[in-house]
């Protein structure tokens, strides 16, 4: 029969489409209505996106758990390995009488100390990278001076292996605005890696100025080389080409993050059996080197054996260590807290102060202010376990003349003291 058909469309309060469909028909002259047909259409695009995001989050969480487990297992091994040597040989030292054997044990302990400290530094840097808090403090850096220091330090480490270290390519003068600590960290890490895999020959470092005004630093070695199919993997976390060589597999990924944050890139060129060349670039942002003039009439003339150093340190073990290192060269005074440091300075006017930052009664900052009221010129070196670049900047801005981080390296401590004393004294 004949019929009448109509539809209506609309949306419910949630935005879903609703279609109403109604028909009227005539049968033998009678008009009949069919049931209303309701069609509801749902847009599931948003639901599907949420579902995919949840699935992605689930996969990331599972991967994170897997990486965390691998990280903890790896760190457990890497921490226990040097600790085993440090604890074991430290105990043996008390029972050994042969001097050559003692020297051998001491060297083993020192090498493992360095490994453990590097591991801790890598873990801290990884944590800062993950949280986005890795700090970069820019200041004028004399590149040649810094690389000469690194070369000298690495030469001492390379000599026992019969490996020479050479500082080859450089500009006559190069002072740039960058983060010295981070630049030093990358170069040292690359040279340490080169030494690990080089048993003879040489390690060569240097830098050149590129046409794009980037400085290209390099570290070349005559070691075993890296297979081409492994060269990209070495910049991935926890990847070690040789699992029997000590290390965390974090050094190169951290270097890559640092270099990229500094505005450069990093890479490697290598052939198996022909060594490797690691390189990276940083912007050549030229600045003038600032040298503080030292007037001859401002210097005092003094014998080195007559110099007195005040050590403000509340930890007995830390003081005993610094005292053992310095007492053969200098006269030593000791303050247990910041207030006592001020009183001892009043009574003895030492030539230099090593000031711990965290002390009871009065901390290092307060003691420094009290001594500055008595003498604005006496060199005060902060000694602290806080080792981030931002901590160093805060310490130097607050009025300290220098900074040295715990655990203290004796060679660096002597160098820092001599630098500070040379500013005010003519030592003979």
Image (cartoon, rainbow, N blue to C red):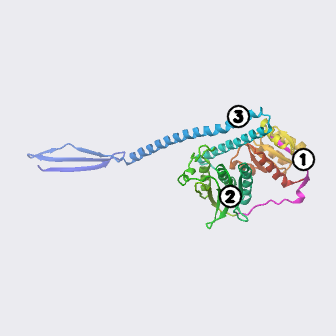
Task: Tell me, for residue 121, which label it has, or none.
Answer: none
CA gap, disc 1 and disc 2: 38 Å
74 or 331, which is in the foreground?
74
Q: Up-down: is 272 above or below 214?
A: above
**Residue indicated by mark 3:** 88
Q: Which residues are magenta?
A: 287-312
Pick whichever of labels 2 and 3 is earlier in the sequence.
3
**Residue indicated by mark 2:** 205
Pick whichever of labels 3 and 1 is earlier in the sequence.
3
Secondary structure found at label 3: helix
Q: Is residue 241 left or right of residue 307?
A: left
Q: Up-down: is 15 above or below 79?
A: below
Asked where in the image residue 385 lies, by quadrant, the reply is top right
Foreground: disc 3 or disc 1: 3
Q: Up-down: is 210 above or below 320?
A: below
CA gap, disc 3 and disc 1: 38 Å
Secondary structure found at label 1: helix
Rate crowding at label 1 as few (under 14), some (14 to 19) or many (20 or more) other CA atoms within 10 Å: few
**Residue indicated by mark 1:** 305
Q: Is residue 170 left or right of residue 342?
A: left
Q: Is residue 244 left or right of residue 398?
A: left
Rate crowding at label 2 as few (under 14), some (14 to 19) or many (20 or more) other CA atoms within 10 Å: many
Foreground: disc 1 or disc 2: 2
Q: Is residue 368 magenta?
A: no
Residue 221 position, x and y percent, is 65, 55
Residue 127 position, x and y percent, is 61, 44
Pick whichever of labels 1 and 2 is earlier in the sequence.
2
Asked where in the image residue 290 lies, by quadrant, the reply is bottom right
């Amino acid at each position: 029969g004949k019929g009448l058909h109509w539809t209506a469309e609309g949306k419910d309060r949630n935005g879903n489409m609703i279609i109403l469909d109604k028909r009227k028909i005539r049968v033998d002259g009678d008009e009949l209505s069919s049931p209303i047909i309701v069609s509801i259409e749902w847009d599931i695009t948003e639901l599907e996106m949420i579902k995919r995001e949840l699935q992605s989050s689930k996969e990331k969480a599972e991967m994170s758990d897997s990486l965390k487990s691998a990280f903890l297992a790896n760190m457990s091994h890497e921490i226990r390995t040097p600790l085993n040597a440090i604890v074991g040989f430290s105990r043996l030292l008390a029972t050994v009488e042969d001097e050559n054997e003692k020297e051998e044990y001491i060297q083993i302990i020192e090498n493992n100390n360095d490994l453990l400290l590097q591991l801790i530094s890598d873990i801290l840097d990884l944590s800062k990278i993950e949280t986005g808090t890795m700090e970069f403090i820019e200041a004028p850096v004399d590149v040649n001076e810094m690389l000469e220091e690194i070369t000298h330090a690495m030469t001492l480490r390379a000599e026992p292996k019969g490996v020479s270290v050479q500082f080859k390519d450089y500009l006559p003068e190069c002072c740039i605005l960058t983060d010295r600590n981070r630049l030093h960290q990358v170069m040292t890490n690359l040279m340490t890696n080169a030494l690990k895999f080089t048993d003879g020959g040489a390690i060569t470092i240097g830098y050149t100025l590129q046409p794009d005004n980037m400085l290209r630093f390099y570290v070349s070695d005559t070691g075993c080389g890296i297979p081409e199919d492994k060269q990209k993997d070495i910049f991935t976390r926890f990847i070690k080409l040789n699992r029997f060589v000590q290390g965390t597999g974090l050094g190169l990924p951290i270097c890559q993050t640092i270099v990229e944050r500094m505005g450069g890139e990093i890479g490697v060129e290598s052939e198996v059996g022909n060594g490797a060349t690691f390189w990276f670039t940083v912007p050549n942002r030229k600045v003038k080197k600032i040298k503080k003039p030292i007037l001859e009439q401002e210097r005092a003339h003094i014998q080195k054996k007559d110099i007195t150093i005040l050590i403000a340190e509340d930890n007995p073990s830390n003081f005993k260590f610094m005292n053992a290192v310095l007492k053969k060269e200098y006269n030593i005074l000791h303050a247990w807290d910041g207030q006592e440091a001020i009183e001892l300075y009043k009574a003895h006017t030492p030539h230099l102060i090593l000031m711990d930052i965290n002390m009871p009664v009065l901390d290092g900052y307060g003691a420094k202010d009290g001594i500055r009221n008595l003498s604005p010129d006496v060199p005060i070196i902060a000694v602290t376990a806080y080792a981030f670049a931002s901590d160093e900047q805060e310490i130097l801005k607050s009025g300290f003349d220098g900074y040295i981080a715990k655990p203290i390296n004796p060679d660096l401590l002597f160098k820092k003291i001599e630098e500070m004393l040379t500013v005010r004294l003519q030592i003979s």
